[in-house]
């Protein structure tokens, strides 16, 4: 029984953590099936493969010439292949993004294996002809406690944001180098597991320096990759903010120029009114004043709300829509709110760009309705636009009700626009829901942020 429990626990620790790490970076909308079911299936696969493993290892007791280490590695390879098939089936995103998460999980597993093998020689009696003797099991448990939390945090925060925001064409070159480095690392570990026992000491110490070098290179490369993603995102948001500021500056400049012209025109208008007054033509005076009032009202710059960032974003995207003949109806009532400018840009940018894109594909009247307000400590955003069709993911019944981002996939194959909205809303303890009305041919976005 002790033999069975040791090998069950050792195999589960070694393979289960890596499986879960692969799934952590992806939000609900990235899965083809409900996220809880996917995690449950992953746990069941890890549990049953671990439960069967000791039974097969026990064959050694009745089979002469049985290579226990080789069989254990082959069994683990088969279990990993089953998981990889399940993993690629469960996610509905780009393959390259799945591969990046998978390679990070493999890096975790390989690093854990490396540390265990480095530490085993330090314990007398640790090297025994068994896959998971007590010392090895204790080392795997210890390295799990040491490595899994930082790797899980890495997957949950920077990796998730990186995969959600980065453009596919921007990571193809980095991915090739990343794949080669991971392949080199894993190949070296496979070579080590196949070493003759008599070459243990010399061979291992010859292998340690390049392994540690590759681990260091992978760590630096991953860190650089994520930092580059953060920089690209920051630069993109700064460019967007600069465009909005330039728009506001242009509006102010045009308004000042209009005021200068109005002062010049006012001089002539007053002279003309004086002439009409001298002639006693009251009707002509009223008509002229009415025309002058209309001209002045048309020159006013539209101010949507008191929040400068939201107002600038609305001016920018309403102007973009107007250039394409799309009529926008906006009601906004927001002052100072505790939402970062970057997040406001993500929210309104995705909403308006998706709406404008949908309007381009329809014939007839094109319009967008946007409502923004603060109610009971929450910021609410509601946007409606005409929409010809959507692309259901097949996970939810399209009955006209509000659904999460996972109910839809992008017509371009990505689907990260709605997922970005949902991810941003969840950062503030809120939610994002979407509805397609088949009869009215409209698409509605409803977002709530807790302030």
Image (tube, helix red, strand yellow):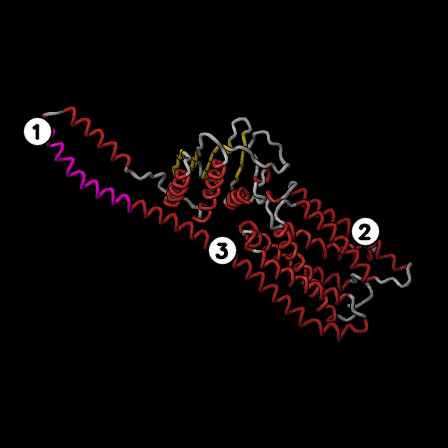
**Could you tell me which secondary element the residue under label 3 belongs to?**
helix
Q: Residue 341 placed where, x, y %? A: 43, 48
Q: Residues within 10 Å of mark 1 (few under 14, many from 20)?
A: few
**Label 2 neighbour load within 10 Å: few <14, some 14-19, many 20+:** some
At 61% across and 51% down in the image, what residue appears?
97
- Which of label 3 and label 1 is nearer to you? 1
Judge the density around disc 3: few (<14), some (14-19), many (≥20) Cα neighbours within 10 Å. some
Vertical order, 51 against 298 (above or below)? below
Q: Residue furthest bottom?
A: 202
Q: Characterize the magenta stretch by its predominant secondary structure.
A: helix
Q: Mark 1 falls on what kind of element? A: helix
Name which residue lies at 47% across and 46% down: 346
- Where is residue 386 shown, x and y percent of the image? 49, 32
Which residue in the protein does label 3 denote?
232
Q: Which residue matches tag 1?
A: 278
Q: Where does the magenta region start and end?
A: 253-278
């Amino acid at each position: 029984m002790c033999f069975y429990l040791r090998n069950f626990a050792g195999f589960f620790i070694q393979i289960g953590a890596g499986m879960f790490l692969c799934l952590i970076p992806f939000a609900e909308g990235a899965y083809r099936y409900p996220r809880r079911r996917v995690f449950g299936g992953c746990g069941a696969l890890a549990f049953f493969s671990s439960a069967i493993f000791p039974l097969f290892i026990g064959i050694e007791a009745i089979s002469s010439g049985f290579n226990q280490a080789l069989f254990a590695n082959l069994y683990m390879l088969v279990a990993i292949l089953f998981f990889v098939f399940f993993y690629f089936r469960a996610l509905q995103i780009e393959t390259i993004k799945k591969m990046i998460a998978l390679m990070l999980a493999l890096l975790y597993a390989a690093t854990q294996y490396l540390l265990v093998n480095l530490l085993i020689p330090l314990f007398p009696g640790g090297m025994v002809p068994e896959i998971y003797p007590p010392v090895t099991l204790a080392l795997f448990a210890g390295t799990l406690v040491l490595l899994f939390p930082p790797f899980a945090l890495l997957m949950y925060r920077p990796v998730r944001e990186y995969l959600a925001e980065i453009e596919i064409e921007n990571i193809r070159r980095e991915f090739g180098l990343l794949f080669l480095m991971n392949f080199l690392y894993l190949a070296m570990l496979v070579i080590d597991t196949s070493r003759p026992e008599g070459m243990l000491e010399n061979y291992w110490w010859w292998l340690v320096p390049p392994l540690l070098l590759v681990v260091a290179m992978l760590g630096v490369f991953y860190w650089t990759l994520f930092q580059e993603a953060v920089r690209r995102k920051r630069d993109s948001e700064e460019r967007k903010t600069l465009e909005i500021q330039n728009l506001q500056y242009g509006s102010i400049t045009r308004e000042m120029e209009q005021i200068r012209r109005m002062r010049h025109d006012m001089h002539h208008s007053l002279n003309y009114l004086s002439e009409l007054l001298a002639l006693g033509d009251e009707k002509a005076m009223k008509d002229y004043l009415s025309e002058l009032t209309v001209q002045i009202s048309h020159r006013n710059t539209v101010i949507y709300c008191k929040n400068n960032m939201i107002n600038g974003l609305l001016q920018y995207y309403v102007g973009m829509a107007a250039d394409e003949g799309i009529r926008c109806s906006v009601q906004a009532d927001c002052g100072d709110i505790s939402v970062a400018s970057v997040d406001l840009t993500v929210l309104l940018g995705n909403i308006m760009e998706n709406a404008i894109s949908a309007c381009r594909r329809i014939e007839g009247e094109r319009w967008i309705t946007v409502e923004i307000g603060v109610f009971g400590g929450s910021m609410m955003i509601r946007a409606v636009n005409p929409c010809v069709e959507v692309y259901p993911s097949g996970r939810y019944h399209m009955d006209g009700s509000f659904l999460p981002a996972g109910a839809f996939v992008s017509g371009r194959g990505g689907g990260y626009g709605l997922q970005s909205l949902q991810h941003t809303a969840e950062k503030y303890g809120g939610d994002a829901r979407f509805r397609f009305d088949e009869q009215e041919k409209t698409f509605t976005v409803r977002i709530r942020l807790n302030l």
